[in-house]
Image (cartoon, rainbow, N blue to C red):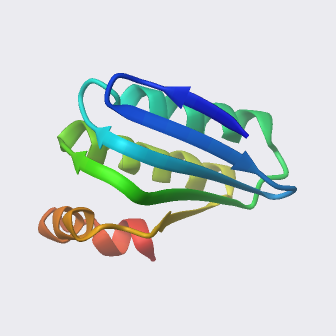
């Protein structure tokens, strides 16, 4: 398990044999989105046997357009790698943003 503190974001990564889970706590925004992008990209690069990447969103407090962009970029990278992306325990605010932007089905199917 690895913890990566940022100003308004804390990421905790837990890995198993074929699965990575990154718990998100705090704000996923312009100031902090790069931390999630870097962690997800590193996990994909270091784990060729990875089948599933779970983003635990229960602790997500706020998300802006940069945070949404990071989720979309992570989805593209997992798709290219043949890894399933899961947005677990989504708060209502995240679901509302995904619905308003037309990305809910794209990111959760």
**Viewer-closest of 53 and 82:** 53
Horizontal side of 79 relative to 24 (left or right) equals: right
In the image, residue 38 sits, relative to residue 14, either above or below, namely above
Horizontal side of 85 relative to 62 (left or right) equals: right
Residue at the location (42% across, 24% down)? 6
Horizontal side of 22 relative to 31 (left or right) equals: right
Percent x, y of residue 14: 70, 48
Percent x, y of residue 52: 68, 61
* Image quadrant where residue 94 sits: bottom left
Percent x, y of residue 101: 16, 62
Quadrant in which the C terminus is drawn: bottom left
Quadrant in which the N terminus is drawn: top right
Residue at the location (46% across, 35% down)? 10
* Image quadrant where residue 105 sits: bottom left
Residue at the location (37% across, 50% down)? 72
Horizontal side of 57 relative to 16 (left or right) equals: left
Q: How many marks?
A: 0
**Viewer-closest of 49 and 79:** 49
In the image, residue 31 sits, relative to residue 84, either above or below, namely above
In the image, residue 72 sits, relative to residue 31, either above or below, namely below
């Amino acid at each position: 398990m690895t913890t990566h503190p940022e100003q308004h974001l804390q990421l905790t990564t837990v890995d198993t044999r074929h699965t990575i889970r990154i718990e998100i706590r705090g704000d996923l925004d312009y100031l902090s989105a790069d931390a999630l992008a870097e962690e997800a990209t590193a996990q994909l690069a270091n784990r060729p046997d990875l089948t599933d990447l779970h983003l635990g969103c229960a602790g997500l407090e706020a998300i802006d357009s940069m945070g949404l962009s990071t989720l979309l970029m992570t989805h593209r990278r997992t798709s290219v790698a043949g890894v399933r992306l899961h947005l677990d325990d989504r708060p209502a605010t995240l679901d509302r943003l995904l619905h308003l932007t037309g990305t809910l089905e794209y990111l959760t199917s």
